[in-house]
Image: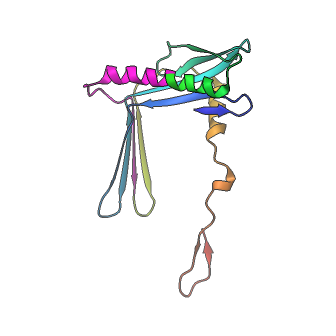
Amino acid sequence: MAYDKKQELPFATINLHLMKMIIARDPRRNMTIQITSSQVNGSYFEIQDEFVLIERKMLGTLDNINKFSIKDIPREQVVEEILTSTNNFARTIAETHQGSRGKEQLNVNIQMTPSRDKVIRIALDELKIYLITGIYLQLVEFVRMDPSVYPAPVEVIQPGQSNQKF
């Protein structure tokens, strides 16, 4: 859930329902990570008349709209109501997929070698998208890493050589 600090309310959420992750490493130190999800859904939120927060779908199942009252209600309680609604929706999806091995909507396969080479394969089944450019730009800004978390340069010192920075 992406959170707007000024309004103290979420502005978007993306859910990977029935997600599975498998991490495997072989004796030669190659690593494979596989992430699958049965269904991908996403929502954005907008305030209507200063009293109602509307959740509109932007990814996956687009036909579901939820309304949450925000008048005289603590923001934490509104977020709890949104999470409860999302959990109920996820439960419905789980019940629908129970016992079936349907096709995964999202499949990400990452292969890494000890030399840090990576091969990333992403398979995305049919997905409905309601394109609201402003929301997607806000999400890009939300996930952008702060420069303070970038790793420091590594110094490699080998016998007989000067320091090299990478």
Magenta run includes residue 89: yes
User: In the image, 154: left or right of 4?
Assistant: left
Depicted 144 relative to depicted 103: above or below: below
The residue at the point 56 percent across, 23 percent down is 82
Residue appearing at x 67%, y 18% in the figure? 70
Question: Magenta residues?
Answer: 85-112
- Measured as percent of width and height from the top left, residue 58 is found at 55, 21
Could you say where residue 139 lies in the image, as x and y percent from the top left? 62, 34
Q: Is residue 107 left or right of residue 135?
A: left
Question: Percent from the top left, x then y, of residue 79?
Answer: 60, 26
Of residue 30 and residue 160, the one placed in the foreground of this image is: 30
Q: Is residue 113 magenta?
A: no
* Quadrant in which residue 2 is drawn: top right
Q: Position of residue 148 (x, y in %)?
A: 68, 55
Residue 129 appears in the picture as rendered = no
Count of numbered tags? 0
